[in-house]
Image: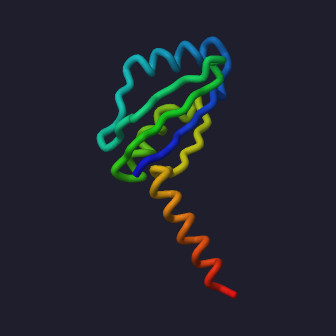
Amino acid sequence: MLFHVSWEGIDPTEEGQKRGMALFERWQPPEGAEFQGFYGFADGSGGFAIVEVDSVAALSRTMAPWTAFLRFDARPILPIEEQTAIEVEGIAFRDSVG
């Protein structure tokens, strides 16, 4: 499963930033989670990642260490070709109902 995971900081204090950076230096993604892309916003307010996970539990384990510092939004995503085909199916269904 592929997810777009975005986050924003919720602890803007210098102490919170220092603690977050110290943790991040030692952190490794959990088993079952592979980062396809990992980006921070230039203004320092947060960032986003494209994460492939083998289960929702792996996604939860990816975010759990950071909930004291970050607010997350995790949305499942599909390759555009697949999403487009699904939307075409939806249109066909609606057109079939008079």
Horizontal relation, residue 73 to residue 25: left or right: right
Furthest residue toward bottom? 98
**Which residue is painted at 29% across and 40% down in the image?**
31
- Location of the C terminus by quadrant is bottom right
Q: Is residue 33 above or below residue 68?
A: below
Give the color scheme: rainbow, by chain, secondary structure or one colour: rainbow
Q: Quadrant of residue 60?
A: top left
* Relative image position of residue 1 (x, y in whole percent): 40, 52
Horizontal relation, residue 66 to residue 55: left or right: right
**Which residue is painted at 46% across and 15% down in the image?**
22
Residue 8 vs residue 85, the one in the foreground: 85
Q: Is residue 87 above or below residue 19?
A: below
Residue 84 vs residue 4, the one in the foreground: 84
Q: In which quarter of the image is residue 12?
A: top right
**Which residue is painted at 53% across and 40% down in the image?**
5
* Relative image position of residue 58 (x, y in whole percent): 38, 46
The total of numbered circles placed on residues is 0
* Relative image position of residue 40 (x, y in whole percent): 55, 23
* Relative image position of residue 30 (x, y in whole percent): 34, 37
